[in-house]
Amino acid sequence: MNFLKKPKVAVLLAAHNGEKYIEEQIQSILDQKNIDIYIYISIDESTDKTLEICENLKNTNKKIQIIQRGDKKFGSAGKNFYNLFINVNFEYFDFIALSDQDDIWKSSKIIRGIEVINSSEAAAYSSDVECFWEDKKYKNKLIKKSYPQKEYDYYFEPAGPGCTYVINRELATAIKNKILTLNKLPFHHDWFFYAFARSNSFKWVIDEQANILYRQHSSNQVGANFGIKSKLKRFKIIRSGVYQEQSKEILKSISIDHKAIRYKILKNPFKYRRKNSEATALFFFTLFGWIK
């Protein structure tokens, strides 16, 4: 990699009915400092003006490309991101980054990730995020994901929101090749990417510096978890078995037998979640049979 030149970065942006926020987000990506940036947009089937907005932006900036024009239904952000990984050629890029359609990136977001990757000899980067509410219902809040990584944390959690991910070309290519071998892809693409990296000895750094304004609104597919209602919602998901099935998907995708995990969690849950309180909760969920 020639560091005398600006790092060349492909930003993969998954969109769906994003007319309200997508232009602001794309502009914040184009405003990134000290990198040579290209944006690849995949639009899930939409009923608003997302395509029209993206077309207008593409016509004024040759570094914006639309690879899916809203005429195909993916049905989830994960499937849309998998489509981007499969169809974007990584050969000419130094780094790959993921983007949602409704956040705002601080101008140093990408270069910060690259600098951390290079200084720590890592393959990938993610970070904490700063949540904001468009209706000003709450003050901005930090989502902290940068607790110390644990040996098997990737069995049960991603490396933070996927919109913070910056991945080098080697790892991104390895992920793409793995995607092409799987008959069923995990629902959570960001969790899968982290699990694949960690299980294949790619170093991943989680940064405590938040470089994204993470928008919270009624249409979030996945958002922040604040307050009693959000905690109760998460508890119901665990009781329903959905979380366990998602974990099984991840483990299967990286060729790990989930049946052997329960007894290991009961022996030492602190190897499986970064935050100690969540490791303790995992222990009791497993003890009560909600994680099997």
Image (spheres, rainbow, N blue to C red):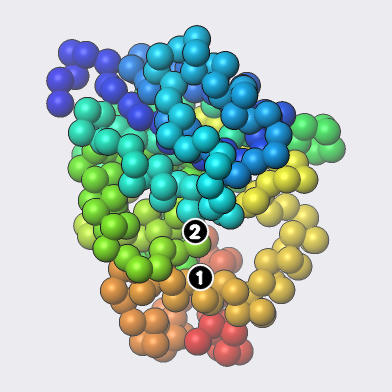
Residue 138 horizontal side relative to residue 13, left or right: right
Q: Residue at x 30, y 32 (%)?
A: 95
- Identify the amino acid type marked 2: His
What label sits on residue 17 in the rendered view?
none
**Residue with the mark numbered 2:** 188
> The residue tagged with tag 1: helix, strand or loop?
helix
Q: Residue at x 55, y 42 (%)?
A: 71
Q: Nearer the viewer, residue 233 or 174?
A: 174
> Relative to residue 37, is residue 163 depicted above or below?
below
Look at the image and tell me whether residue 241 can be seen.
yes
Question: Residue at 53% of width from left, 47% of height from top?
Answer: 72
> Relative to the observer, which residue lies in front, 174 or 134?
174
Q: Quadrant of the N terminus?
A: top left
Whether residue 6 is situated above or below residue 112 in the rendered picture: above
Corner quadrant of residue 57: top right
Q: Closer to the camera, 236 or 272?
A: 236
Quadrant in the picture for residue 67:
top left
Q: Counting other residues with Cα less than 10 Å from the Cα at mark 1, is it few (<14), some (14-19), or many (20 or more)?
A: some
Left or right of 110? Residue 70 is right
- Bin the neighbour count of mark 2 within 10 Å (Cα to Cα): few under 14, some 14-19, many 20 and up: many
**Residue at left 59%, top 84%?**
290
Can you name the residue that lies furthest to the top here? 60
In the image, is residue 213 above or below residue 247? above
Q: CA distance from mark 2 to mark 1?
A: 8 Å
Q: Position of residue 185 (x, y in %)?
A: 41, 63
Q: Type of residue at label 1?
A: Gln
The residue singled out by tag 1 in the image is: 246
Q: Residue 279 versus residue 213: which sits nearer the camera?
A: 213
